[in-house]
Amino acid sequence: MKINLVVNGKRETVDADPAMPLLYALRDDLKLNNPKFGCGRAQCGACTVHVNGVATRSCVTPVSSAADKNITTLSGLGTAEKPHPLQTAYIAEQVPQCGYCLSGWMMTAAALLRDNPKPSDAQIRTALAGLKCRCGTHMAILRAVKRASTLTA
Amino acid sequence: MDQHNLARRDFLKASGALVITVAVPGSVTTALSQNAGGKPPLTPDQLDSWIAVLPDGSVTAFFGKTEMGQGVDVAIAQIVAEELDVAFERVSVVMGDTALTCNQGGASGSTGIQRGGMTLRNAAAEARRILVERAAERLQVPVTELVVDNGVVNVPGYPLQRVSYGELIGGKYFNSQIEWNKEYGNTLALKGQAQPKAPSTYKVVGKSFPQKVVTEKVMGTTQYVTDVKVEGMLHARVIRPPTAGCGPVSVDESSIRNIPGARVIREQDFIAVVAPREWDAVRAAESLKVTWAPPCAPFPTTANLHDHIRKAKATGSGAPVDIGDVAAAMKTAHRVIEAEYEWPLQSHASMGPACAVADVKNESATLWSGSQKPYYVRTGCAQIAGLKPAQVHAKWIVGPGSYGRNDAGDAAHDAAMLSKLTGQPVRVQYMRHEGTAWDPKGPAGVYRGRAGLDAAGNVIAYEFSGKGFSRWDVSPRESTPNETLVGQLTKWPGKPIVMFQTPSEAYGFANKRLAWETIPALLDRASPLRTGHFRDPLGPETHFASESFIDEIAHAAGADPVAFRLRYITNPRHAAAIKAVAEKAQWQARPYPNPNRGKGELMTGRGVSYTERAGTIVAVIAEVEVERASGRVWAKKFTVAHDCGLIINPGSMQVVIEGNVLQATSRTLFEEVHFDADRVNSVDWATYPILDIADAPESVDVVLINRPEIAPSGAGEPSTRTVPAAIANAIFDATGVRLRKVPLTPQRMKEALARA
């Protein structure tokens, strides 16, 4: 079936099995590679995008449920000229190693900072619970989210 | 410009040999064409195989290793910029492409700088020598009167007397040879006529330049191997048996008949499904009905693993350290201390399961892989494709995390097999269980320590031995199909090699014996529990035990654990690292277990550990909180002193060490592969939990000990081995209870506290 999506501000249409996860529509049909396949079970976060502003695991989200909704991927957070404060902070802290997990941490943290611009250390840890980073960049992630909370968008 | 050069440049232009173009940042495309005329062969003895100066004077370095997220390419750019006297920003590094770079082993053993960097340093120094000599000829000034400033050769005091590298050679080949030791891989080494710079003069090396690729990753523009798309490619999913060691009896192809374009590809016991659309391949893999041979129960179960190791017949053994007469000295001991430790099987569990794309044609093939070792994977895939290695072009592209011989090489060989069988380009994307249940595992082992003390508490005899699975049941190289699942499922039997490890430290015990034994693999064909290299192979396993044991001896001797270690270490670098970490953590000798740990819900303690790895010395102090009721251990604070000689990029090193500490903490507290007699049950993040951000420490303080006069050794892995015992020793300090079985789970902690 044909499904309309608005991805990073652009109208798109995909023709897909309605049960197909949004992840495959973004990666394969729209060639938007930011969300990654990590587990397919909503256990790691690598596939996270914003759906109408909510950090969502696209690997278990049927594409049909995202119809007509606004989807934002990592590259839709900011631009080289106007990066999102989290992007600025992640670059300053040199956070990623392999970087495959970034969509999980950054899209989740972006939603946190929008709702709670000055989170405490404990609130940051709570908001990011359950996300996976195998390279062990957690210390740099915590520094970067804290730093981002001091920058204005 | 003399006539000869003009003529040559014109010739190069006319023949299309002026082929060096700017390497696009983040691009996987090439900076040099291999087919144009004038290019010397891509052999290590050609300077052009290492360094190119572009027409604008910028420099491309060709590096035969790969970047696993730790910034080694930035360090290489710094080293090359330093030796050539060009700005860091003007150096690009091309890596991991077999058509553009010589085999320096790929990512391997934390040798990126230790070996790979020294090769590039010597090549860059040689390039500078040649360029300055050409400038001297051009300017008619002796070499000794020339200085180079950001790629421009000057005569001080004569501002018009200058020529840039771009003018001297931009876009042309050096066509100059450099002495090569005739080896490939990690040991490849070069020696030019030029003398590299003295470290005391360094301006670029030693500074914290950021990684360009970090910006690209954070802005979402990096292409990963999972993002490679080739015209006409099929998507594949591989079908694994539900139980280990079982081959397929029959495949019901009609079970996927209703999925568009989906079909089964089978070669002996290797089965996959392919489809033009990825989701259809996923559905086909889920739907395909296969009848498998009955389970053959090849495994001892997780609970019985270490008993199995104790009882298993040894396949190999050794005692690389055997000093004095341990047995005789032990007999005279006033007191003998003994302890035994266990480490489980662990999964790389990379952030994403592996992916590879192969395009096998009749006379050639292209391979896109995230494997750390594209130069070796190429030869294995060539065998599968029935081609010569030279006919296969392997391109490394950043993958979903890699810490050794994970599932990447298997995926590459699968892709080659499926592309050959289908005649189309094929993208193999593994599913989560393949990254966790089916990757080669970090070996499990049983470790024993025995020490004899005299009446004064001095160590008069010390022996330590480990017994477990080989770290080379599957080779880390992935250079033959024999080392891969698809190879072993078809016509290439496994070729295990016996390899183990003993502790790496500098304790000067007068009678000392370090020994090892290996045991056979649990299943010799296509096993989900085959063992191989996982970050710092056998490092955390061995040193968890050996450094816990040193702590137990210190406690028995009534000595402070820092002072006890220093008592037996005469090597000044080793002692300095221990002193540095103790000073930074404000360690004061006091009785232990911690007399002030309290009777409340939270118990606190501290522990120290120290190790060496291939020239790098690391000392760690961990501070932990243990929850009495739940048994939860929080490794709250780490202090690390790290000495790897000359530091190229302190900023990168800080985050690399943090990554080691966090990953090693995860392995120590949480990670264990679970399996029963038939199958591996650790298949995803729920069944193979790793460290969560709730468990991240409050702080990791790193003391970088820079020794510019000492050639750099590795930093990618050494701190991994130091962490586990520091945590275990801190737990003992906090609780008075010694945990000797990893992972140090809340359940084990609670049980140990209840027994105490």
Image: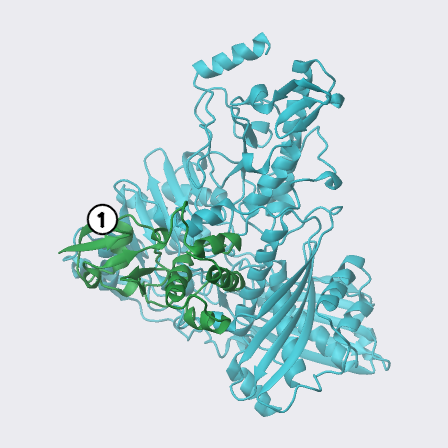
User: Please, what is the three-letter code of the amino acid marked with disc 1?
Assistant: Pro
The colour with which the image depicts chain B is cyan
Q: Residues within 10 Å of mark 1 (few under 14, many from 20)?
A: some
The quadrant holding residue B190 is top right
Residue A38 x %, y %: 37, 60
Q: Position of residue B615 (x, y in %)?
A: 70, 54
Look at the image and tell me whether residue B509 can be seen: no
Q: Residue, x 51% and y 36% (percent of image)? A: B101
Looking at the colours in the rendered structure, which chain would you say is drawn in green?
A: A
Which residue occupies the foreground of this view, B717 or B651? B651
The quadrant the C terminus of chain B occupies is bottom right
* Residue assigned mark 1: B276
**Who's the residue at 46% across and 65% down the image?**
B529
User: Is B740 placed above or below A142 here?
Assistant: below
- How are the residues colored? by chain
**Camera-side residue: B158 or B706?**
B158
Q: Position of residue A102 (x, y in %)?
A: 42, 57
